[in-house]
């Protein structure tokens, strides 16, 4: 249950099968997939000296072999048929990321006039590998015209993504889903149908305990994507956005407007892998250590070069040193940029207010805090975030203030169009549309507990919040996840598995996962012996993407 | 050591050996208890079974007696800390329960028993004779764990491998058959260790599923391809005839120019379709008009319109050949594709050479490194070994030069289009990067390496030390010589003095003492001289 090694195994196979000089033929979607798992220099080592796109105009290189890594879509089929009628390369080795329908093969066969195709295989890698336990299907919007209605393309893509995820991990799961979500139900039915229909593919060794595919709907936890994040990976995504391992940010310290683009890949960058779940404070310390580590290396080098032997040694270590220093400067500039934004946006205060809003009992002072921040000098997006969180929290407690808040947002200089996000959010993910409670329940017992918590002191004010997913997963592992909220799709599977402890769990969040949830999932994987969890989302959200998605919904929902 | 201890309990399959094993251990125990039977506490006289028990007894009963007075003041303090510790321990336990320690609460069996209950039930079914025999003071079998197995840490047999583990390292469950082998279908839930849990077949299978669809594809393609191949053969036969037509002797160039004659000749190869049968061009689906004239494909004889016909000019042909699209696809483009793809271009061969060189470079590099490290390991260097190292280095450098040359050849090879150019560029860049990296890492042969000498940094240092010692000694000797010479000077002065005072008896004794001084000085100068020689 490791997405990185699964994807690596696929590419290793490709390189083994076509070992000599070759060209890699991709399309837009698969380019993202490939770049999420493999680097350019890695490709060069495997004698792939040219990477081309199927849709582009290309010149003939008929003496070279071609390895094509494509998604089985109608567009691809059309382009590929055209390609085969006038082949540009000597041989075609076709690798598709998903199940190929028979008709697809038939059309290809008809077009292959010169018998240029040498192999066709299905490699089930139809998702982006983000961490070794986090995958993304990269679909920004999933809703058609009501919060319960899938957009056709998105539905198909998500379905394909889940199928390929299951096949690449070799799992034939039982399906559980959010009971209040029609999106999840439809998806669950489709996935289940495919599993039965493609029984030849889903023919794995029977495990002790059937793996569980848990389909969740984002609407049951609208809080997590709206919060300010304080762990490295999540923070970078929240502030700048990580797009398939790439982060671009404009460097505000050196006045030029050019934005810097850097690559963050946990498999290639050990420092990043180590620190991606550290909070901002610890990260600062780690970065400092990292810099001083480099400094000791560099000063030693400069002062000690006296003889030719030293020189030699220096040169031997130099590429390593340069790599290290490149990496250090990358992280230093990223972290300094983060702290700039934190200052500018007053995120420390914002974060504190958010956390107390979400984790503590509702208090009347919350409104004053929000009000003060709304008229302070922070960005539109942050204001929206705060207002949205307040609205979700006080939706039932104090509806008058929630609507007053929207007026205040406009007064505070937020685009009225964007303010409409809040009613839409309440319409999509408001209290009556959620199940379970994202907020700590307010009864006497919990009040006593929160009082205790106050006495004991919270470890870190900024990361008190635990995503809703955590309680769901804990319940699931301990067999306490209720069937009223998360039913099994087929009732006969329930009897077998309800009294067994789950071993392998695949969670898919429809509407997008967050890095905060990914953080908790990998914590689970590290601390729960015998339980392995993979998280996937239709996309990886940050607050900007989530608000965008809600905006998109507000324009579509009638 | 620890490893050895753990191996005591290697899986013993037969009952007999199991028996003898336990017997041995019990007899050993009784022996030891015999020896220490008479231990009793020196303070209160209580009889105790063995020394360690006595130790415990002393600690517990008599330790506080001496310090009771001291402790009284702090008692409130210590009570507070104790309770606090207890509270935090409790909390920790609660957290453990919540987080880790409840792995068995589910996994029930058909009878409805769950958790540990269920494992207890199945224990009577699954064989136990492979279990590691219990000995006192055992340590958990997990290589990363050194917990003593006792009541608190637990001592649990892994039902599958039979080794004994602590509670924490045995909280996994898999299904085992009654023969204690893994059986996911009909097995019973049993408590096992981590290794057995993760060692289940398929559990750590990280290879994704792959399905080849080539066979299905081939069933679709084969009939089509066969048809195409037949068509190709037919067309190529006609093509050959067409070519022969114009080269054969009985057809003159003039005939070719006479349209009627040419037409007749070409019609002899393939039957031309009747004009009247076809009203619509089969390629573009337009009906024929005065401007959209009918044309015949010279290879298949079909009627097509003049916009769809392709004119192909061939060598030795007086006029371009008219061909329809499908014949073009089936014959000409096929021929072109097959020739182009089997053509081996110059630079491709160079790239292949590059790969060969690279392979050889990797090999030689490794050989060179090996022999060099052998050389520097302190063995006496012989002519032969030194030569091998030098040869290998030379070979490697020669290869580098060849590699570099090939690289330049590739870069300078003319390319027919941009894609090819880019391809070559990437090849060259990669090769350059590789070359730079390996050459940078190439270790030099130490230049003062000589035959018949063992090259180690240590021997060099020893030599230096010796030299230093010699110099020190020399200096010492010089010092003593100076002192002696001074004495001689003094004695000589005294002799002069005595001579002046006419005390000849004194002169005599002084002279006699002068002689050994001179001797001493002589010996020291000789020694110094010797050391000088040694230095040279």
Image (tube, helix red, strand yellow):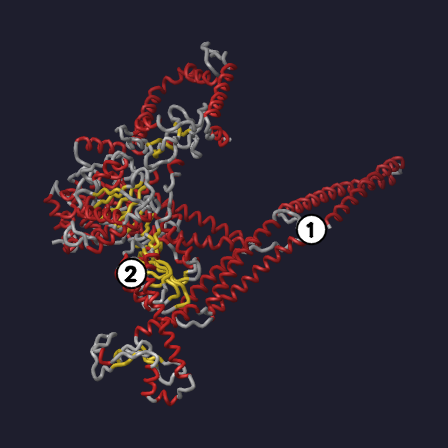
Q: Could you tell whether B529 is left or right of B70 in the image?
A: right
Q: In terms of depth relative to the viewer, which is nearer, B166 or B263? A: B263
Residue A251 in sight from this viewpoint: no
Whole-percent x and y of residue B305? 25, 79
In the image, residue A363 sits, relative to residue B16, either above or below, namely below
In the image, residue B494 sits, relative to residue B20, either above or below, namely below
**Of marks 1 and 2, the one in the foreground:** 2
Whole-percent x and y of residue A115? 36, 64
Distance between mark 1 and mark 2 Cα atoms: 76 Å
Secondary structure at badge 1 equals loop
Whole-percent x and y of residue B505? 89, 35
Circles 1 and 2: CB atoms closer than 8 Å: no
Quarter of the view holding residue A447: top left
Residue B484 in sight from this viewpoint: yes
Q: Residues within 10 Å of mark 2 (few under 14, many from 20)?
A: some
Q: Chain of mark 1?
A: B
In the image, residue B494 sits, relative to residue B65, either above or below, namely below
- Evaluate whether label 1 is on the same chain as label 2: no
Residue A106 has which mark? 2
Q: Residues within 10 Å of mark 1 (few under 14, many from 20)?
A: few
Secondary structure at badge 2 equals helix
Q: Could you tell whether A363 is left or right of B340 in the image?
A: left
Q: In terms of depth relative to the viewer, which is nearer, A231 or A124? A: A124
Q: Which residue sits furthest top?
A: B45
Residue B51 has which mark? none
Q: Chain of mark 2?
A: A
In the picture of the structure, the residue carrying the numbered disc 1 is B452
Q: Could you tell whether A551 is left or right of B237 in the image?
A: left
Q: In terms of depth relative to the viewer, which is nearer, B138 or B334? A: B334
């Amino acid at each position: 249950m490791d997405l990185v090694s699964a994807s690596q195994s696929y590419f290793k196979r490709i390189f083994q099968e076509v070992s000599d000089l070759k060209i890699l033929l991709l399309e837009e979607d698969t380019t993202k997939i490939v770049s999420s798992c493999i680097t350019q220099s890695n490709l060069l080592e495997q004698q792939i000296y040219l990477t081309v796109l199927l849709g582009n105009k290309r010149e003939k290189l008929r003496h070279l072999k071609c390895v094509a890594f494509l998604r089985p879509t109608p567009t691809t089929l059309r382009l590929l048929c055209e390609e085969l009628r006038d082949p540009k390369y000597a041989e075609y080795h076709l690798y598709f990321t998903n199940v190929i329908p028979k008709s697809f093969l038939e059309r290809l066969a008809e077009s292959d006039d010169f018998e240029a195709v040498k192999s066709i295989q299905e490699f089930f890698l139809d998702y982006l590998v983000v961490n070794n336990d986090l995958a993304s299907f990269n679909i920004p919007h999933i809703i058609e015209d009501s919060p319960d209605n899938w957009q056709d393309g998105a539905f198909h893509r998500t379905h394909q993504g889940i199928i390929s995820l299951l096949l690449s991990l070799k799992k034939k799961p039982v399906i559980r889903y959010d009971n209040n979500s029609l999106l999840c139900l439809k998806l669950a039915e489709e996935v289940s149908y495919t599993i039965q229909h493609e029984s030849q593919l889903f023919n794995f060794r029977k495990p002790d305990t059937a793996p569980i595919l848990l389909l969740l709907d984002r609407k049951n936890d609208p809080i997590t994507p709206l919060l300010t994040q304080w762990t490295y990976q999540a923070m970078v995504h929240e502030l700048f956005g990580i797009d398939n391992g790439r982060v671009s940010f404009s460097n505000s310290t050196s006045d030029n407007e050019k934005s810097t683009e850097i690559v963050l890949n946990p498999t290639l960058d050990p420092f990043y892998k180590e620190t991606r779940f550290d909070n901002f404070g610890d990260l600062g310390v780690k970065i400092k250590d990292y810099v001083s580590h480099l400094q000791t290396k560099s000063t030693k080098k400069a002062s000690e070069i006296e003889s030719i032997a030293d020189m030699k040694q220096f040169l031997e270590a130099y590429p390593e040193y340069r790599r290290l220093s490149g990496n250090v400067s990358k992280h230093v500039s990223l972290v300094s940029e983060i702290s700039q934004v934190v200052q500018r946006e007053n995120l420390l205060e914002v974060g504190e207010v958010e956390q107390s809003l979400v984790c503590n009992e509702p208090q009347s002072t919350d409104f004053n805090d929000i009000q003060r921040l709304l008229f302070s000098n922070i960005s539109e997006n942050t204001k929206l975030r705060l207002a949205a969180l307040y609205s979700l929290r006080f939706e039932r407690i104090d509806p008058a203030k929630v609507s007053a808040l929207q007026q205040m947002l406009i007064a505070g200089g937020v685009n009225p169009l964007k303010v409409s996000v809040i009613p839409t959010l309440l319409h999509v993910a408001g209290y009556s549309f959620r199940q379970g409670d994202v907020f700590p329940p307010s009864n006497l017992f919990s009040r006593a507990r929160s009082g205790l918590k106050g006495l004991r002191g919270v470890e870190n004010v900024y990361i008190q919040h635990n995503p809703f997913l955590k309680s769901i997963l804990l319940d699931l592992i301990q067999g306490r996840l209720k069937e009223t909220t998360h039913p099994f799709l087929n009732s006969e599977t329930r009897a077998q598995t309800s009294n067994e402890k789950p071993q392998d769990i695949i969670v898919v969040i429809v509407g997008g996962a967050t890095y905060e949830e990914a953080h908790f999932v990998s914590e689970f994987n590290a601390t729960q012996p015998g339980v392995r969890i993979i998280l996937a989302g239709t996309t990886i959200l940050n607050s900007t993407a989530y608000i965008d998605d809600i905006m998109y919904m507000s324009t579509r929902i009638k | 050591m620890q490893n050895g201890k753990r191996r005591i309990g290697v899986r013993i399959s037969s009952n007999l050996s199991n028996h003898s094993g336990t017997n041995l251990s019990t007899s050993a125990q009784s022996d030891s208890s015999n020896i220490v039977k008479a231990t009793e506490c020196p303070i209160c006289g209580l009889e105790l079974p063995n020394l360690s028990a006595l130790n415990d007894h002393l600690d517990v009963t008599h330790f506080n007696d001496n310090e009771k007075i001291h402790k009284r003041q702090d008692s409130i303090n210590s009570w507070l800390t104790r309770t606090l510790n207890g509270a935090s321990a409790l909390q920790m336990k609660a957290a453990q329960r919540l987080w880790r320690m409840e792995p068995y609460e589910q996994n029930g069996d058909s009878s409805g028993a769950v958790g540990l209950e269920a494992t207890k039930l199945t224990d009577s079914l699954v064989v136990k004779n492979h279990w590691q025999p219990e000995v006192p003071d055992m340590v958990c079998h997990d290589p990363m764990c050194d917990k003593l197995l006792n009541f608190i840490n637990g001592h649990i047999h892994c039902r599958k491998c039979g080794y004994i583990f602590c509670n924490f390292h045995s909280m996994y469950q898999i299904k085992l058959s009654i023969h204690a082998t893994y059986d996911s279908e009909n097995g019973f839930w049993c408590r096992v260790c981590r290794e057995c849990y993760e060692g289940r077949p398929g559990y750590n299978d990280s290879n994704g599923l792959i399905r080849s669809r080539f066979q299905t594809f081939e069933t679709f393609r084969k009939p089509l391809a066969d048809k195409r191949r037949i068509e190709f053969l037919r067309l190529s036969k006609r093509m050959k005839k067409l070519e022969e037509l114009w080269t054969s002797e009985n057809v003159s160039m003039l005939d070719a120019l006479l349209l009627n004659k040419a037409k007749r000749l070409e019609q002899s190869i393939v039957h031309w379709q009747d004009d009247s049968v076809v009203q619509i061009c089969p390629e573009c689906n337009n009906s024929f008009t005065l401007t959209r004239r009918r044309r015949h494909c010279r290879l298949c004889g079909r009627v097509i319109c003049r916009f769809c016909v392709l004119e192909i000019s061939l060598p030795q042909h007086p006029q371009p050949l008219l061909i329809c699209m499908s014949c073009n696809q089936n014959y000409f483009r096929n021929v072109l594709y097959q020739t182009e793809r089997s053509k081996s271009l110059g630079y491709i061969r160079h790239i292949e050479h590059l790969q060969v060189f690279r392979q050889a470079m990797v090999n030689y590099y490794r050989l060179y490194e090996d022999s060099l490290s052998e050389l520097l390991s302190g063995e006496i260097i012989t002519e032969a070994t030194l030569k091998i190292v030098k040869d290998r280095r030379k070979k490697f450098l020669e290869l580098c030069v060849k590699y570099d040359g090939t690289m330049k050849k590739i870069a300078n090879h003319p390319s027919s289009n941009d894609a090819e150019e880019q391809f070559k560029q990437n090849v060259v860049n990669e090769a350059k990067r590789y070359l730079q990296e390996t050459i940078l890492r190439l270790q030099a042969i130490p230049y003062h390496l000589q035959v018949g000498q063992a090259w180690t940094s240590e021997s060099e240092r020893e030599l230096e030390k010796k030299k230093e010692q010699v110099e020190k000694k020399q200096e010492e000797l010089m010092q003593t010589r100076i002192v002696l010479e001074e004495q001689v000077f003094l004695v000589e002065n005294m002799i002069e003095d005595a001579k002046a005072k006419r005390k000849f008896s004194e002169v005599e004794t002084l002279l006699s003492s002068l002689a050994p001084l001179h001797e001493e000085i002589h010996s020291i100068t000789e020694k110094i001289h010797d050391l000088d020689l040694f230095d040279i």
